[in-house]
Image (spheres, rainbow, N blue to C red):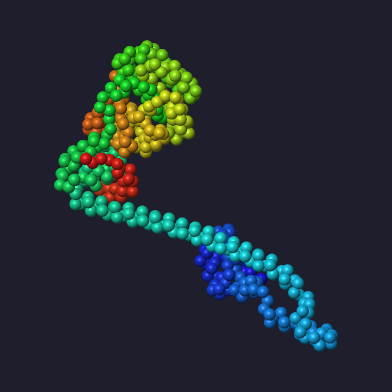
């Protein structure tokens, strides 16, 4: 069997060499990649046919007359009818060897077919990825051209875009709203429409009776340093003023941070409320069972980075505590929009009861956090804008927050993009526009 090896930089290159050397009917035995090149083992069609087919009858009869001439006896010459039965020394070796060659041939052919299918699948996958990439590039370019044309025909939309970006709102939300902007509005009317839509989509609590009067178990969660302990103390003060200290209980799970329990214990002592410390789910179950007669229980949890596996463990602990624990996520107004999105996704779990905006007094802009609350459809309970307990905690007022977002816009943000850069920015936002599709316009 004359098996030859061919190598090439690609499958196409190696197959071309096979066709040039063995013809278009060559049989491919294997196809694999090795050391950055494609290696093909091939066999000429004639050689493959000789292996796959048994010897012809004419070939089996050719050597027989020579043997008869040299060694045959008169009796055998007198009985020609028995010549086909004459023994052939080579026949036993061929009969024993043919099944082995056929089995090996079938195995090699099956292996070659598997390699061909594998390479075809890989090439198809690569081709589909290239098509998707080309489609994305074309959509981006078309969106860029479209926005450039819109910017020239409707300059008020560019004004609205700059205002939203300067206030901290995302380009994806800004583009979605601008695309839905009613026709015929001037700049001032367009801004009023934008503020109305944003306010309509900001879910806030109309009054705190739903929380303070109904009571229950509330856990304040979020990353380290977002103001959970201070917010817990502010809520505790509101509960004490409404129902008295005997109706409230405080629990802390923060056994990691030095002085964390002590800080909450000081607040509890001022309010006349006992503070309970728990370490794990079993402790929390016992504590909640003992405190089931309390009207309201507030849990101050340990701060965990949104990228830490402990977030999942904390959510599981609160969910399996044997009580309906409502989780309130503390969102730091000074954090970037990307960070806030990560925080919400990490702490979402089976669902958040709501959120609290913290550090409003430290934020240069608040459009970033309002954007996340709107797109993630969170219920905004309170806004915290200082360290004073209990004064610096307010019910969220949607109209006030939207107006404040545009009043706090950064001076540099309004000029950080030139007119030539806005089309590209909007084109990139078009790919993420599905994040804002749930916004209600009416």
Q: Could you tell me how many numbered marks the image carries?
A: 0
Residue 179 horizontal side relative to residue 306, left or right: left
Q: Is residue 24 above or below residue 195?
A: below
Q: Is residue 138 above or below residue 237?
A: below
Query: What residue sits 41% from the left and 18% below the top?
Result: 292
Residue 275 horizontal side relative to residue 412, left or right: right
**Residue 45 percent coordinates (x, y):** 59, 73
Residue 17 horizontal side relative to residue 222, left or right: right
Query: What residue sits 37% from the left and 37% below the top?
Result: 341
Does the rendering let one see residue 264? no
Query: What residue sits 44% from the left and 59% below the top?
Result: 127
Which residue is at the front of the view, 183 or 299?
A: 299
Query: What residue sits 55% from the left and 65% below the top?
Result: 8
**Residue 419 percent coordinates (x, y):** 25, 48
Which residue is at the front of the view, 240 or 64?
A: 64
Quarter of the image holding residue 222? top left
**Residue 343 percent coordinates (x, y):** 39, 34
Does the rendering let one see residue 185? yes
**Residue 73 percent coordinates (x, y):** 84, 85
Q: Is residue 419 above or below residue 5?
A: above
The quadrant of the image that shows the C terminus is top left
Q: Is residue 251 above or below residue 156?
A: above
The quadrant of the image that shows the N terminus is bottom right
Which residue is at the front of the view, 66 or 375?
A: 66
Residue 307 horizontal side relative to residue 186, left or right: right
Quarter of the image holding residue 5? bottom right
């Amino acid at each position: 069997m004359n098996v030859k090896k061919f190598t090439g930089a690609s499958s196409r290159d190696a197959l071309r060499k096979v066709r040039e050397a063995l013809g278009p009917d060559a049989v491919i035995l294997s196809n694999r990649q090795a050391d950055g090149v494609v290696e093909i083992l091939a066999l000429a069609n004639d050689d493959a046919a000789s292996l796959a087919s048994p010897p012809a009858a004419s070939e089996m009869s050719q050597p027989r007359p020579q043997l008869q001439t040299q060694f045959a006896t008169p009796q055998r010459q007198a009985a020609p009818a028995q010549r086909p039965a004459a023994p052939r020394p080579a026949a036993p070796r061929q009969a024993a060897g043919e099944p082995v060659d056929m089995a090996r041939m079938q195995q090699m052919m099956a292996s070659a077919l598997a390699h061909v299918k594998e390479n075809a699948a890989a090439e198809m996958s690569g081709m589909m990825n290239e098509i998707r990439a080309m489609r994305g590039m074309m959509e981006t370019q078309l969106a860029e051209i479209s926005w450039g044309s819109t910017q020239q025909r409707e300059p008020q939309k560019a004004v609205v875009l700059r205002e939203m970006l300067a206030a901290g709102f995302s380009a994806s939300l800004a583009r979605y709203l601008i695309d839905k902007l009613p026709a015929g509005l001037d700049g001032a009317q367009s801004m009023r429409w934008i503020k109305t839509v944003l306010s309509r989509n900001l879910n806030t609590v109309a009054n705190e009776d739903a929380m303070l009067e109904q009571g229950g178990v509330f856990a304040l969660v979020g990353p380290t340093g977002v103001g959970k302990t201070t917010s817990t103390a502010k809520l505790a003060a509101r509960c004490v003023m409404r129902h008295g200290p005997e109706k409230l209980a405080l629990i802390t799970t923060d056994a990691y941070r030095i002085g964390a329990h002590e800080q909450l214990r000081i607040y509890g002592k001022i309010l006349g409320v006992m503070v309970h410390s728990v370490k794990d789910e079993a402790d929390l179950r016992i504590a909640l069972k003992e405190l089931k007669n309390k009207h309201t229980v507030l849990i101050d949890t340990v701060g965990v980075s949104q990228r830490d596996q402990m977030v999942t463990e904390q959510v599981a602990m609160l969910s399996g505590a044997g009580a309906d624990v409502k989780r309130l996520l503390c969102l730091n107004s000074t954090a970037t929009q990307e960070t806030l999105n990560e925080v919400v996704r990490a702490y979402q779990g089976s669902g958040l009861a709501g959120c609290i905006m913290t550090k409003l007094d430290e934020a240069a802009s608040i459009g970033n956090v309002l954007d996340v609350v709107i797109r993630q459809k969170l219920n905004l309970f309170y806004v915290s804008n200082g360290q004073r307990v209990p004064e610096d905690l307010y019910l969220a007022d949607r109209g006030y927050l939207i107006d404040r977002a545009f009043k706090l816009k950064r001076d540099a943000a309004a000029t950080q993009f030139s007119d030539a850069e806005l089309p590209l920015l909007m084109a990139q936002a078009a790919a993420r526009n599905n994040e804002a599709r749930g916004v209600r316009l009416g």
